[in-house]
Image (spheres, coloured by chain):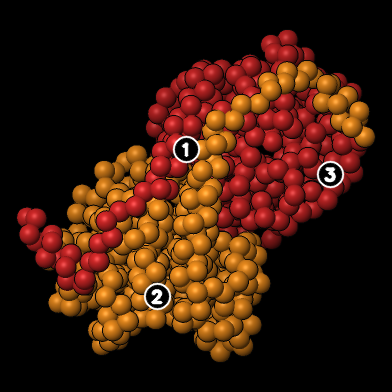
Chain colours: A red, B orange
């Protein structure tokens, strides 16, 4: 079901990839996603070189299916060392985090035979990474959890699809079968899910995070640069709200840096209920903790049923009612 | 094709409604949309009572199909007088702008037999207007042009669909057949298009606006409260950017009010290329000015073709490739 060009490109069964998540998506989750027919992706953000090597080994011990590593471009030395490890250890697929990994890195990975999928927030950015040799592009809307751009998934995906020749994966605001089918309707060849995969049995996220996912509404996230210095969508908390407000009133780079240090310290010592974690706007849709296999197979099966329903709806003709002004009033009055 | 419950509810042929647009969507556009099988909607924002009466009469002279009036809640007296005109003149359908029209207004309209469709930005708001008697709900993402909330269309629509019992229309970030099909996949029974309808032969928008739509990219909009005092997505211009930046540094309500007066004056006297207009993030997708009929019939026909393609894709099974780590590298090397 739903075997697309992405499945051929990555050697996976279903066109569903798991967004890299520091603190929630280690070897256990990554292997579970790949074993269930999707593509698991290891994070590198915040980790040492040794941790990355260990994670790759651990994942390989759990699955023989393809998985990927995500490289967040947080400085040239970091990016280059993580890319070198991926090449050396033969990781077949690398995604690059929101932001620019640099043409040099993409070219080096590509020359080593690695399939590179950059995550991009705009058409402009998509065109650049395509020219640099991206095998496919992950167009990620600003409703996603984690690092975000400014454009939303619904308008972003078709505009990226129209601009590039390589396959496009949709990310941001997707959490179930409806999201998969909507993304494919927009011209994507697959989806990347992040937040939804945190709420799984195999995710390494702490219990308080899973519990928070179950009770947070769709308006319960905020974009803040506190955590990484770049805009990140996360659970909205008092500390993030106050930091963003204070930031608006800071007049110099020094003031802003001092504020960040102060609030980061507060965040580090905050009680559990005031802590935060990257999460996207689909959070309000999460009502259960499932196994990864249940989740992926459920999404694909439901999307297939929905695709048939949509096809039938496309052929639906109604009695063409010519409702004159005022007629609705009379009709509805008559009904009472 | 695509005859949904929305078509039955409103007495229209296709599940496409036109978002109310001050300055772009007068009687000519509204009648053209209704004549082509959609639902045209007259704006009230910024207009007098007499102008609304005249617009309703003019639209009726151009079409006998149903059309609607949008009431933006900019004060109780305004809302009540516009609702009274709609009731008195037998307008069959009323949409209410982003924000809360008040339960009293919805109830009065409903008691008069008017079908009320509020535009909402969140699940919380959707539940409230449903309880007040909304016949259907327009869930509008923050990528839309005009007044916006904080949640994007892709995650908002399915969460509203899950929360309410009445039909849900998707709005925000939609501009073509792919958007229609994606919205239906998310569980909506139809779509509201705004920005895309400005770029039509029948829209009353000035030439500079239509020309600007053709050359603005998806990142070329900004959310600013300059125009109406509430967040509005519009073409990003120097004046809007500077106002928003200055606003962040204003410390009191007086400062903010003074800033708004100053920048509104600057906007009013700005040369054409510095003027702005509400526009959504699909703006980068607009490449031509079409007639309304071409646009609507094109969207529906293409969406039907696409629905069939998606249905076929849902049944697609690939050769299950078990791509071992490193195999991708070898395969791609062999290809070179």
Number of other residues with Cα within 10 Å of mark 3, as a class: few under 14, some 14 to 19, many 20 or more: many
- Marks 1/2: CA–CA distance: 32 Å
- Label whose residue precedes the other's in the sequence (1 or 3): 3
* Residue topped by disc 2: B32
* Residue A71 relative to residue A153: left or right: right
Depth check: give the residue in front, B259 or B141: B141
Could one spot residue A71 in this view of the protein?
A: no
Query: Residue B316, position in %: x, y?
Result: 59, 30
Number of other residues with Cα within 10 Å of mark 2, as a class: few under 14, some 14 to 19, many 20 or more: many
Depth check: give the residue in front, B60 or A199: B60
Query: Residue A18, position in %: x, y?
Result: 62, 30
Total number of numbered labels?
3
Task: Name the chain under label 1.
Answer: A
The label on residue A307 is 1
Query: Residue B215, position in %: x, y?
Result: 66, 72
Q: Nearer the viewer, mark 3 or mark 2?
A: 2
Query: Residue A51, position in %: x, y?
Result: 77, 20
Number of other residues with Cα within 10 Å of mark 1, as a class: few under 14, some 14 to 19, many 20 or more: many
The residue drawn where x is 54% and y is 18% is A293
Considering only vertical position in the picture, is B216 above or below A11?
Answer: below
Depth check: give the residue in front, A176 or B177: B177
* Residue B94 relative to residue A307: left or right: left
* Residue topped by disc 3: A133
* Residue A250 relative to residue B70: left or right: right
Q: Quadrant of the rendered structure where residue A211 is?
A: top left
Judging from the image, what secondary structure is the residue with disc 2 in? Answer: helix
């Amino acid at each position: 079901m739903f075997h697309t060009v992405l499945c051929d490109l990555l050697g996976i069964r279903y066109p569903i990839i798991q967004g890299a998540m520091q603190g929630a998506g280690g070897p256990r989750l990554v292997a579970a996603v790949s074993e269930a027919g999707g593509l698991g992706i290891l994070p590198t953000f915040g980790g040492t070189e040794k941790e990355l090597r260990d994670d790759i080994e651990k994942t390989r011990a759990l699955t023989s299916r393809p998985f990927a590593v995500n490289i967040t471009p947080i400085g040239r030395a970091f990016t280059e060392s993580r890319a070198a490890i991926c090449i050396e250890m033969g990781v077949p697929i690398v995604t690059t985090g929101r932001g620019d990994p640099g043409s040099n890195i993409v070219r080096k990975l590509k020359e080593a035979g690695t399939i590179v999928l950059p995550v991009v927030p705009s058409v402009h950015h998509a065109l650049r990474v395509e020219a640099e040799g991206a095998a496919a592009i992950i167009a990620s809307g600003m409703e996603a959890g984690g690092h975000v751009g400014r454009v939303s998934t619904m308008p972003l995906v078709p505009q990226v699809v129209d601009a590039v020749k390589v396959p496009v994966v949709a990310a941001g605001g997707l959490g179930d079968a409806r999201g998969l089918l909507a993304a494919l309707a927009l011209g994507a060849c697959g989806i990347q899910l992040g937040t939804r995969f945190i709420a799984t049995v195999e995710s390494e996220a702490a219990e308080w995070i899973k519990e928070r996912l179950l009770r947070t509404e769709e308006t319960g996230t905020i974009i803040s640069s506190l955590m990484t210095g770049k805009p990140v969508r996360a659970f909205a908390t008092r500390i993030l709200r106050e930091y963003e407000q204070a930031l608006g009133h800071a007049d110099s780079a020094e003031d802003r840096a001092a504020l960040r240090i102060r609030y980061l310290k507060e965040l580090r010592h905050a009680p559990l209920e005031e802590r935060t974690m990257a999460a996207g706007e689909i959070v309000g849709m999460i009502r259960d903790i499932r196994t990864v296999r249940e989740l992926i197979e459920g999404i694909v099966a439901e999307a297939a049923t929905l695709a048939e329903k949509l096809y039938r709806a496309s052929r639906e003709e109604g009695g063409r009612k010519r409702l004159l002004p005022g007629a609705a009033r009379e009709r509805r009055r008559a009904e009472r």
